[in-house]
Amino acid sequence: MMLIDCPWCGPREQLEFRCGGESHIQRPGPAEEISDETWGNYLFFRDNPKGVHFERWHHLGGCGLWFNVARDTVTHRIYAVYPMDAPKPAIGKD
């Protein structure tokens, strides 16, 4: 079981959270200036890396707030937990 350190509630088991997918996705726009291909890429294509991935998480079983997590998709090691409006942290390999 993964232990996630909620920025507001502290460490909790993964079961209290829901992953909201890749973070730091920017909506293209303005709408009248983007192509169908660009819009389709925004809606349907996401990174699926082997290694560090930046994700949005929702503390559904606790405070109800959203935050970002930098997590290794192979080992599930969490490198960073940070607010939704913060930039991606620089993550180095050990």
Image: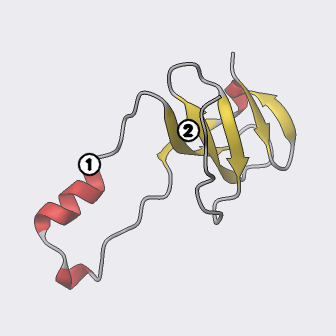
Q: Write the residue at 67% across / 36% down.
A: 79
Q: Is residue 33 left or right of 11 when viewed as pictured?
A: left
Q: Write the residue at 69% across / 21% down.
A: 2
**Residue 77 shows up from this direction:** yes
Q: Is residue 69 left or right of 39 when viewed as pictured?
A: right
The residue to which callout 1 is attached is 44
* In the rendered image, the vertical position of residue 11 relative to residue 54, given as above or below: above
Give whichever of 90, 9 is nearer the camera: 90
Residue 91 is situated, as x and y percent measured from the top left of the image, at 61, 43
Residue type, mark 1 in image = Phe
Q: Is residue 61 left or right of 21 when viewed as pictured?
A: right
Which element carries disc 1, helix, strand or loop? Answer: helix
The residue to which callout 2 is attached is 19
Q: Write the residue at 72% across / 31% down.
A: 16
Which element carries disc 2, helix, strand or loop? Answer: strand
The number of numbered discs placed on residues in the rendered structure image is: 2
Could you tell me how far apart the alpha carbons at marks 1 and 2 are, in whole angstroms? 17 Å
Residue 90 is situated, as x and y percent measured from the top left of the image, at 61, 50
**Residue 59 shows up from this direction:** no
* In the rendered image, the vertical position of residue 10 relative to residue 7, given as above or below: above
Residue 15 is situated, as x and y percent measured from the top left of the image, at 69, 25
